[in-house]
Image: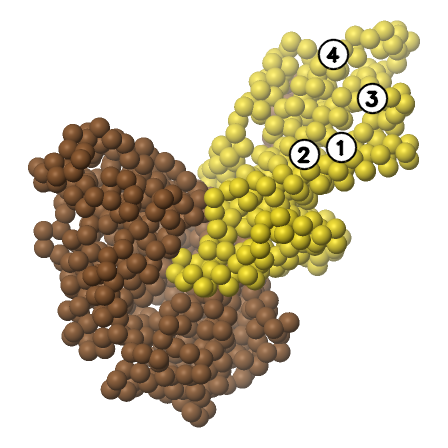
Chain colours: A brown, B yellow
């Protein structure tokens, strides 16, 4: 082969690649007639859509698009607003809740959304004992749900539960007729609802591959109507899974997608500087903590834990996040109901740290601790390095250990196998303080957010008492005391609230931030690719 | 020949059983709790137990193993916890995409590697030979994820010629499934627009996957061609006035292809294994991506299913290569 031939072959290859690429779209949104379909991308698939079986941020985003609940979270701070229920009332003892349904809601197949559908959906969720069941199962028996008439549902709790209403937006209503018709061998329609649609939400399924592409069509005559002007109403929305952040970023730059989430802090900063792209920035509701094993090793000593908490360089967290974070001033995030800033909340103070350390058998340091984080999470790794540097003045060494998520969770379930220190992000599923308070009660042991292994009878009693309190003022007082108690016990180094960000094309409008949504979850009902 | 095939098939079954034993042990040694992961972080203990019972994970390990092997004998691979589907259904859904990628990348490797190896041998020690050898070393040395990200950056972001990831545009409906391989199905349906679009999506992942194979084929083919071109019968053919194209392209290549063919067979297994990484970077919806997603969730039935599927495919490919080898050189079948 001569040099000329070689160059010719190379040029032909390049031309071929270019020719193949010529058919690609110039922008992500797809046109259906004169309407547009927005393309959203994240890294997490949706293997199971069933609203009573599974939820995580991507799953809940799609469930929220296809199903409706009695109420919905909207706004910042998050508020529970009426949805399928136009109003509700509760008895004085907090045991009975009566929901009055709207009259015009209908499922995608045309069936009306009635009280029986609500009763069936709650019963199904409780009996399956999966997904959302944990929220209400201790307070609600299937026999406690009654369809009083076509538009009235009465729910009777077994004991008062202050957080009850905060979970209602997460209990989606399915069409019982469709589920029953598709039930196979007593599976309660689980196989059908894995990728099937029995909802009444603003979108219905056009094409579903939970591992790659989920295309939804907008319901033109959605019973609740649409928030944008009629001319801007979308034709649908597509959720495309791109697992790695680098190709995801490239796809947004290239115009293959309109909106992305789950990028690194550096990627968001770079995207924000690019023309035609905007990056939102809001204070998140996901506390980052370094949990300390309170039952084993040096961290079982309260004074030792206090020493670590006062030695840690909290400003390093802000540097790692490029400033897009807010330091915690309580175990509860700021957007949570009942949050109070705790006085004298631990910040770096080496004198105090040394004073606490002097009260322990490790006054001169000389020990090594394991800091474990989820393999692949660069931010957590860098926080480990910051911790390592922070504890050097105390003579304490840190081994930064990466573990796959399943291993980390399994080992963290028991005090004997749990690491000394573990990096943990936890997004509360509701803004009710009970959700976070419960993570420090001994009933949480075995769950991943309880890798601190904390077991304190006083705190347990305080959490139980606050949970059954229905007087709003007294509840807040009790949760304020709980926050103080948690800080006194210092089961964690309380870190920060990472800002929540989404990057999108400038023509994407209608995005509304609501802190209670999980990680990358967006309300797809509100967003659209503007025509102008 | 029939006896050879029957013996090899018997050995194949035994090897697959060995693979089942190893994957089962490895899966269960890993410190993780798939039921707890599937139940979700908020799940209470009894909710985790519900999932554990549903998937038979509450039984002792020996019982689980016997049940798995019994099911396997009936071609049942169990249920995936993550998707709730039968693993065999999931494999049937995702395997065609992997097969398409592997076939395309092997095609690339042969089409590029063999001519490059030939040309390199013919132009031995010329600049072209040096360039090809540098390419061969780079192809082996460059990690697939690195090559993938670099090519994505150049061809998708900078030049904008090819899509970043996926198998087909989100707006394009896949052609009616015949083989499950979009390229073949599009051709079958004579849908050239979809074929062209799908080819655009497949070019980068297939090329990245083929790089080490191209390198290996170039090196083997070059070495064999150099040896064969120096053989007496080639000199005799040239002396008898046989055209250079016929000498190189037929006489020499046919003999030099034997080790190359064996190499292609070996590379098939490697290519299948490497597809895990390439499918993840390019979000190619094949069994590699399925296995990675499952492994990250400690969902081991799909991982075992994928391992068995890949093991069987590699073993079958090697068997076919052996048979082809015997056809090209009948002396080998006697051995």
Label 4 to label 3: alpha-carbon separation: 13 Å
Label 2 to label 4: alpha-carbon separation: 27 Å
Front of the two marks 2 and 3: 2
Q: Residues within 10 Å of mark 3 (few under 14, many from 20)?
A: some
Would you place residue B203 above or below residue A338 in this image? Answer: above
Give the letter of the chain under mark 2: B
The disc, 2 or 4, on the residue closer to the chain's N-terminal end is: 4
Residue A44 at x, y = what percent?
46, 53
Q: Residues within 10 Å of mark 4 (few under 14, many from 20)?
A: some
Q: Secondary structure at mark 4?
A: helix
The answer to whether residue B84 shows anywhere in this view is yes
Give the letter of the chain under mark 4: B
Would you place residue B254 above or below residue A257 in this image? Answer: above
Residue B137 at x, y = what percent?
58, 20
Label 3 to label 1: alpha-carbon separation: 20 Å
For the C terminus of chain B, give its image quadrant.
Answer: top right
Question: In the image, which disc is placed on residue B226?
Answer: 4
Pointer 4 and pointer 1: residues touching (CB < 8 Å)? no
Q: Is residue A128 left or right of residue B16?
A: left
- Badge 4 and badge 3 both on one subunit: yes
Question: In the image, which disc is placed on residue B269?
Answer: 2
Q: How many marks?
A: 4
Label 1 to label 2: alpha-carbon separation: 9 Å
- Badge 2 and badge 3 both on one subunit: yes
Q: Which residue in the structure is indicated by mark 3?
A: B254
Residue A424 at x, y = what percent?
32, 48
């Amino acid at each position: 082969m001569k040099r000329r031939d070689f160059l010719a072959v190379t040029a032909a290859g390049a031309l071929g690649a270019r020719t193949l690429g010529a058919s690609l779209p110039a922008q992500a949104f797809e046109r259906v007639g004169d309407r547009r379909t927005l393309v959203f991308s994240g890294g997490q698939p949706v293997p199971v859509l069933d609203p009573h079986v599974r939820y995580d941020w991507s799953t809940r985003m799609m469930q929220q698009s296809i199903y409706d609940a009695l109420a919905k979270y909207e706004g910042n701070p998050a508020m529970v607003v009426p949805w399928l229920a136009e109003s509700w009332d509760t008895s004085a003892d907090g045991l009975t809740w009566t929901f009055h349904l709207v009259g015009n809601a209908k499922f995608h197949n045309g069936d009306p959304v009635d009280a029986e559908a609500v009763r069936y959906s709650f019963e199904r969720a409780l009996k399956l004992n999966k997904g959302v069941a944990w929220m209400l199962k201790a307070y609600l028996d299937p026999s406690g749900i009654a369809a009083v008439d076509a538009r009235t549902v009465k729910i009777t709790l077994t004991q008062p539960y202050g957080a009850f209403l905060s979970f209602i937006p997460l209990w989606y209503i399915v069409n019982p007729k469709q589920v029953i018709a598709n039930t196979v061998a007593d599976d309660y329609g689980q196989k059908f609802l894995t990728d099937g649609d029995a909802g009444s939400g603003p979108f219905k399924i056009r094409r579903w591959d939970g591992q790659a592409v989920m295309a939804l069509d907008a319901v033109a005559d959605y019973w609740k109507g649409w928030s944008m002007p009629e001319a801007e109403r979308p034709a649908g929305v597509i959720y495309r899974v791109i697992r790695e952040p680098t190709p995801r970023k490239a796809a947004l730059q290239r115009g293959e997608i309109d909106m992305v989430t789950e990028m690194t802090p550096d990627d968001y900063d770079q995207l924000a500087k690019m023309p035609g792209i905007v990056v939102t920035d809001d204070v998140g509701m996901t506390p980052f903590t370094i949990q300390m094993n309170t039952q084993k090793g040096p961290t079982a000593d309260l004074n030792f834990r206090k020493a670590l908490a006062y030695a840690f360089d909290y400003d390093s967290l802000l540097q790692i996040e490029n400033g897009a974070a807010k330091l915690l001033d309580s175990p509860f995030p700021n957007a949570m109901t009942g949050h109070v800033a705790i006085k004298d909340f631990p910040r770096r103070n080496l004198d105090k740290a040394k004073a606490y350390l002097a009260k322990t058998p490790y006054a001169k340091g000389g020990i090594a601790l394991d800091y474990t984080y989820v393999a692949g999470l660069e931010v957590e790794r860098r926080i480990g390095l910051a911790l390592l540097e922070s504890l050097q003045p105390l003579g304490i060494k840190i081994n930064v250990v990466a573990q796959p998520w399943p291993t980390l969770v399994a080992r963290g379930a028991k005090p004997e196998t749990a690491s000394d220190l573990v990096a943990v992000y936890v997004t509360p599923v509701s803004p009710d303080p009970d959700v976070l308070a419960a993570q420090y009660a001994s009933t949480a042991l075995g769950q991943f957010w309880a890798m601190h292994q904390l077991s304190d009878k006083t705190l347990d009693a305080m959490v139980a008492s606050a949970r059954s309190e229905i007087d709003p003022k007294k509840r807040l007082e009790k949760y304020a005391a709980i926050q103080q108690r948690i800080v006194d016990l210092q089961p964690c180094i309380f870190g920060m609230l990472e800002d929540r960000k989404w990057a999108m094309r400038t023509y994407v409008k209608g995005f509304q931030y609501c802190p209670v949504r999980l990680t990358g979850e967006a309300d797809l009902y509100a967003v659209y690719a503007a025509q102008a | 020949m029939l006896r050879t095939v029957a013996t090899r098939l018997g050995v194949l079954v035994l090897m697959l059983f060995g693979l089942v034993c190893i994957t089962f042990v490895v899966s269960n040694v890993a410190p993780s709790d798939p039921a707890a992961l599937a139940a979700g972080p908020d799940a209470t203990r009894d909710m985790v137990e519900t999932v554990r019972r549903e998937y038979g994970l509450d039984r002792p390990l020996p019982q689980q193993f016997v049940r798995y092997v019994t099911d396997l004998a009936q071609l049942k691979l169990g249920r995936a916890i993550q998707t709730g589907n039968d693993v065999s259904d999931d494999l049937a859904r995702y395997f065609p995409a992997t097969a398409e990628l592997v076939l395309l990348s092997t095609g690339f490797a042969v089409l590029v590697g063999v001519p490059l190896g030939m040309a390199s041998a013919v132009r031995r020690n010329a600049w072209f030979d040096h360039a090809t050898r540098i390419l061969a070393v780079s192809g082996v040395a460059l990690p697939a994820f690195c090559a993938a990200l670099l090519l994505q950056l150049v061809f998708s972001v900078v030049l904008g010629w090819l899509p970043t990831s996926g198998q087909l545009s989100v707006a394009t409906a896949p052609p009616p499934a015949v083989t499950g391989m979009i390229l073949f199905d599009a051709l079958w349906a004579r849908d050239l627009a979809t074929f062209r679009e799908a080819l655009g999506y497949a070019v980068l992942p297939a090329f990245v996957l083929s790089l080490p194979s191209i390198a290996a084929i170039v090196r083997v083919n070059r070495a064999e061609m150099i040896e064969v071109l120096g053989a007496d019968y080639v000199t005799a053919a040239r002396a008898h006035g046989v055209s250079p194209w016929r000498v190189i392209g037929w006489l020499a290549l046919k003999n030099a292809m034997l080790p190359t063919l064996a190499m292609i067979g070996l590379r098939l297994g490697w290519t299948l294994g490497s597809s895990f990484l390439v499918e993840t970077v390019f979000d190619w919806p094949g069994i590699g991506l399925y296995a990675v997603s499952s492994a990250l969730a400690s969902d081991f039935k799909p991982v075992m299913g994928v391992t068995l599927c890949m093991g069987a495919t590699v073993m079958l490919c090697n068997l076919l290569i052996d048979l082809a080898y015997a056809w090209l050189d009948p002396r080998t079948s006697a051995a």
